[in-house]
Amino acid sequence: MQNEQAIGKRSIFKTDTKSLIGAVVMGIVFVIACQITGQIDNMLPWGKMGMLLINGTVWAFFTGILTLLYRQPGGLIAAEVEALISIMYTPLWPTFIFANGIASIWVSFVAVKCDMTKWSHHILAQGGVCVLGNAIVGVGLVLILGLPVSVAAVSSLITIAVTWPLATLAEKKVYDALLKSGMVK
């Protein structure tokens, strides 16, 4: 069985109670981390321009690592807890519901096809998280906030360019540590 997991044949689903409860608890940690980093971003020059680069990196990292740790539906639970609580602080919350869900599902598909032991696997997983998530938020910047398409596109591209490598680095390092500790099976 462990050999099958090593070659990427593990299930997308993990429905034990420990995973489901862990996903809810970590979803709350996800919210707290995003709240703190969002406030930090807002104090910095890029945050004043509306780009949440530290927050986006933390969002992408948590979306990826929690999905790898809890699989589905745990990854969706954690991601959607964060998205639903965002109702309280941003008009972009509808985009977060879609971005978080699609990003979590993307990571699940990558994890089923790849054993997540190589950098390329994490680059692919985080690429989908960052590109898909920021594309959806970019649509929200236009439709909800009324920004010009060019401004939303530049904002999304800059955010992708910053968050993708940083979240990939964090995800790979933390995932390797989780593997070594035996927390990921």
Image: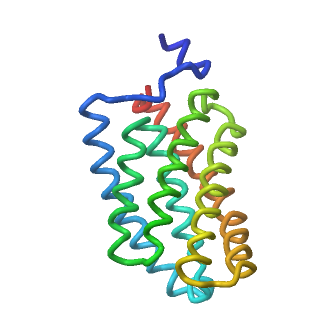
Question: Against 12, is 61 above or below?
Answer: below
**Residue at x-position 49% and y-position 38%:** 68
In the rendering, at what x and y percent does residue 22 appear?
29, 42
Q: Is residue 32 left or right of residue 21?
A: right
Question: Against 141, is 112 above or below?
Answer: above
Question: Against 126, is 1 above or below?
Answer: above
In the rendering, at what x and y percent does residue 157 appear?
72, 68
In the rendering, at what x and y percent does residue 158 appear?
71, 71
**Residue at x-position 75% and y-position 79%:** 150
Question: Against 7, is 93 above or below?
Answer: below
The residue furthest front is: 143
> In which image quadrant can residue 51 be found?
bottom right
In the rendering, at what x and y percent does residue 75 appear?
42, 43
> In which image quadrant can residue 145 be found?
bottom right
Q: Is residue 141 left or right of residue 182?
A: right
**Residue at x-position 42% and y-position 29%:** 13
Q: Look at the image and name its color scheme.
A: rainbow
In the depicted view, which residue is nearer to us: 179 or 36? 36
Q: How many marks?
A: 0
| Quadrant housing the C terminus | top left
**Residue at x-position 68% and y-position 63%:** 160
